[in-house]
Amino acid sequence: MNEAVKRRIFALVALAVAAGALGTIAFSDMGEDLVYYWSPTELLARDDAMNHTVRLGGQVEPGTIDWDKEAQTVSFSISDGSASVPVSCKGNPPQMFREGIGVVVEGELQPDGVFHTEKIMVKHSNEYKAPEGTETDPRKLYSTLDQG
Amino acid sequence: MMSFLSGLWAILTEPVNFIGWLGFAMMAGAIRMKPKFAWEHTVGVWGLLWLTIGCALGLGWAPKEAMMGEVGRILYVHVPAAWIAMVVFTIAFVSALGYLFSGRLGWDWAVEAACEVGVVLNGLLLVLGSIFAKPTWNTWWTWDPRLTASLVMMLTFIGVILLRGAVRDPNRRATWTGVATIVAYLNIPITYMSVRWWASMHQQQSTPATMNDEMKMVMRMCAWAFLMISIWFIARRWRLAQANAMAEMPEPLEIPKGAR
């Protein structure tokens, strides 16, 4: 077989491999096993989650934030609308932390029913606005948490 | 269909996009008129000019972000790095197909140039993203789908460059690089779609509707600047690859004196 034909076959095979792999990832339910965090509903539905380090994501439930600035701890509840998990964090919350914002925490659910964490990560939405007196409606900031 | 056409028209006539159209026109003019300097310097200087203006406007003129404050301004370089990294990897992909279908080594030099420039932009994207993430998300790094996919994308193309360095014969090297580049390009749609397919820390793509107008303009300005500078880098790197290929060629056989 001459070189030119061989090269073209290589190109087509490479394209087929790439397209096949992409199709597999896009249309298989790989996402089921590829989970970055659980929502409160998903966390509470599992009986094997207790005492294991996992990530929990959802909205900071308004009215539940209790920040002890002396002891440098903060507790609040994470909610996904249908279920809610109380969270206790060693350390101060990050700058963007506030009521209604989307957060992801790393830690473990302990037998006392409280999710213990030392790391709060704050999500932000895909909206970029200028400050205009009134602040962004915090409910919009967790809109991207709804998917998946 | 009509809304698509009107959307396209809006993009074509958006004032800030004339930076790009003018840049391409200057590039075409310089290629055609063959000035004493290499044609790519025109887009290079044009890109540097708009990068300077874009950064100045981004730091001083565009409003601070309502939630993130001043820190949000890193957006004007983080997002263009991501966009243009993907564009440059696309140039590598098209060039790889170009080589495999035509057999011309000129395409192969373009693959080499674009892969390297792409890796640089991808590295910049990760570093800038990390700096952005610390004050906003409260972490330098997390293994979420988008971040992981972006890192894998960079490592894959570093792999392509390493593979390239391991093959001696120019034609075989070009074929292997081409095949590897085409397969590696799989990372670009995965990285782009990662925030839609899987729940992640990184937010989904912004759209023109979710962004303040001044911010949008500065971001596009910087994106054009990144593109122009990347074309400049790729062209320079292409010439270097060409020079290397010439040096690599075997010496012509010497014809003994006196022979006819």
Image (tube, grey):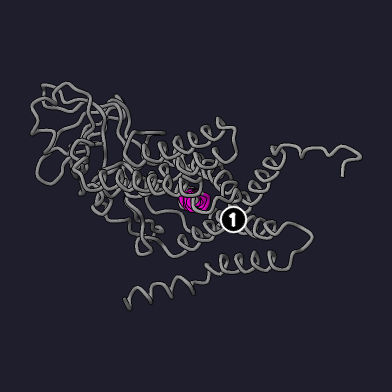
* Horizontal arrangement in the rendering, residue A47 relative to residue B49 (left or right): left
- Closest to the observer, A24 or B58: A24
- Please give the name of the residue rendered at 70% of the width and 39% of the height, measured from the top-left corner: B249
Frontmost residue, A48 versus B238: B238
Q: Residue furthest bottom?
A: B2
Q: Chain of mark 1?
A: B
Amino acid carrying label 1: it is Ala
Report the magenta residues as a range: B86-99
The residue to which callout 1 is attached is B56
Q: Visible in this render: residue B174? A: yes
Residue B34: quarter of image: bottom right
The spot of residue A99 in percent (x, y) is 24, 45
Q: Position of residue B146 (x, y in %)?
A: 35, 42
Magenta region includes residue B121: no
Q: Is residue B94 magenta?
A: yes
Which residue: 58% across, 51% down? B104
